[in-house]
Image (spheres, rainbow, N blue to C red):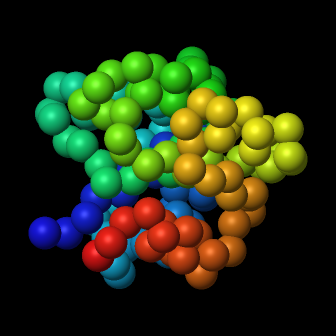
Amino acid sequence: MEKLVFIVDDNETNLAAGAAALEDEYKVHTMTSAKKMFDLMELFNEIPDLILLDVEMPEMNGLNAIVELKKREKWQYIPVVFLTGWADEGLKFDAEGLGADAVIGKPFDPAALLECVRKYIEV
């Protein structure tokens, strides 16, 4: 069965670049907000094998989204990798404390993104 990756970012360029980097090996769903991610998971029972989550987004940022995600027993096991333009050590510490598996800086290298996803998803 093909593994599913969600990419959640309010920037269309980042969504397109992430999808291009991963779509040869994974099924990829892109969405522009954490609300859309939760709607897809709740209403359509689409559960990803990994979530690439932007930190800075309107409505609900990535830090708040991971808190909501980890509260729910049926979703708390999903690996989350943060994508951010300000990947500093403080954010990495905060993100890991909230349950994130990794932090990748933007703009990201497509090969590095694919390698990171492979680390958390067995094809």
Residue drawn 52% across the image and 56% down it? 15
Where is residue 89 drawn, in percent x and y? 86, 46
Q: Nearer the viewer, residue 3 or 70?
A: 70
Can you tell which quarter of the image residue 49 is in? bottom left
Can you tell which quarter of the image residue 77 is in? top left
Residue drawn 48% across the image and 39% down it? 32
**Is 62 on the left or on the right of 33, as rendered?**
right
**Is 56 on the left or on the right of 5, as rendered?**
right
Residue drawn 13% across the image and 69% down it? 1
Q: Quadrant of the C terminus?
A: bottom left
The answer to whether residue 114 is visible is: yes
Where is residue 57 drawn, in percent x and y? 63, 31
Is 56 located above or below residue 102 in the figure?
Answer: above
Is 62 located above or below residue 72 in the figure?
Answer: below
Where is residue 65 drawn, in percent x and y? 51, 26
Residue drawn 76% across the image and 39% down it? 93
Count of numbered circles on the image: 0
Is 93 located above or below residue 23 in the figure?
Answer: above
Q: Nearer the viewer, residue 29 or 99?
A: 99
The answer to whether residue 110 is visible is: no
Q: Nearer the viewer, residue 115 or 53?
A: 115
**Is 30 on the left or on the right of 67, as rendered?**
left
Where is residue 63 drawn, in percent x and y? 62, 28
Q: Nearer the viewer, residue 23 or 91?
A: 91
